[in-house]
Amino acid sequence: MSIKQKIYDYIKSYQTIIIHRHLRPDMDAIGSQYGLALTIKENFPGKDVYVVGDVNDMVYQAKMDDIPNERYQNALAIICDVAVSRMVSDERYALAKDLIIIDHHQNDTDIESVTLFYRDSTYASASEMIVDFIKQFHLRVTPEAATYLYGGMVTDTGRFLYLNNASKTFELASYITNFNPSFQDFYDFIYTETLQKRLTKNLFSSFEITPNNVAYRKNDAELIQKSGLEFQAISRGMVNQMAGIKEIPIWANFTEDVENNLIVGEFRARGIVIVDIAKKYGGGGHNMACGASLKDWDEVELVLKDLDERAKEYAKNTR
């Protein structure tokens, strides 16, 4: 029996299903979580389905549920788009009777008592995994669910720039569009911003460069407060301010998280695998788009040293 069949059978057998995803969600985390929840509700209307976790300006129109601990009793918990315990939003998944993880990253899981661990890094997004699941079991999909799932696919691929298996991704993107997602509303949400936010981006337009052309920024707490922007809008939102420069093969954005006493690093590359460096520091992600939570600015320097060495190796091998 395939793991997708097993997941389907678990979903079918449980009355209460609670869906989690990672902290500080991006659109793929929200898309896979909310798209799956809406799809389960559509196909199994008698079930009690909840979504939980922190919120930010990436949740689109999704609403999280505020549920008591007792709701987890005899429930199925599903975690989407993450497999590392410290990155899961709402640790109460441990209270559920059974636990399923659905993730497209390359990380192993350190979560205990996982019933099913469905990991497949050939998918470019967790939303793509959910769409494939929907397709296999011929599930009904509402336009709202299709919007979230399509949105997760679009954003986690960088508008289809980062692809692991292009033919599969485009096939599944085409499939989910059959269910009439709200393209224009979603694009307006994700790709337009206020004038004030656009002007504020000037605070993050400069960057430094290592000896081997790794571009990087260090965003400290003072700058974050001055900008007035949400943490995620700076950490993940500003990393690609350094993208698209011919001489820069790797770029990184380091943002101070005072609340959790760490530095969040976002790493990107063009044609160079760097996920092993993220994993070295307890992080992970995609081959060329990944990140890690770092202890302090000294550890940031160690990461920069490793990224610089990787850029040096790449330059040497491409001469």
Image: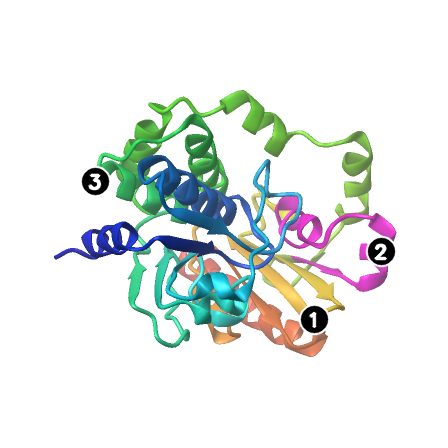
* Camera-side residue of 13 and 77: 13
Q: Give whichever of discs 1 and 2 has the lower sequence position.
A: 2
Residue 150, quarter of the rendered image:
top left
Where's residue 76, x and y in %? 37, 60
- The residue that mark 2 highlights is 225
Question: Residue at the location (31% across, 37% down)?
Answer: 43
Which mark is in front, 1 or 3?
A: 3
Tell me, yes or no, whether the two marked residues, 1 and 3, touch with CB atoms within 8 Å.
Answer: no
Question: Residue at the location (56% across, 50% down)?
Answer: 65
| Kind of residue at badge 2 | Gln
Q: What are the residue bounds of the magenta stretch?
A: 216-241
- The residue that mark 3 highlights is 136
Assign a secondary structure to mark 3: helix
Assign a secondary structure to mark 1: loop
In space, the residues marked 1 and 2 are separated at their CA atoms by: 16 Å
Vertical comparison of 43 with 272: above or below = above
* Camera-side residue of 75 and 279: 75
- The residue that mark 1 highlights is 260
| Kind of residue at badge 1 | Asn
The verdict on residue 124 being magenta is: no
Dot 3 alpha-carbon crowd within 10 angstroms: few under 14, some 14 to 19, many 20 or more: few
Quadrant for the N terminus, please. bottom left
Dot 1 alpha-carbon crowd within 10 angstroms: few under 14, some 14 to 19, many 20 or more: few
| Kind of residue at badge 3 | Gln
Where's residue 124, x and y in %? 38, 47
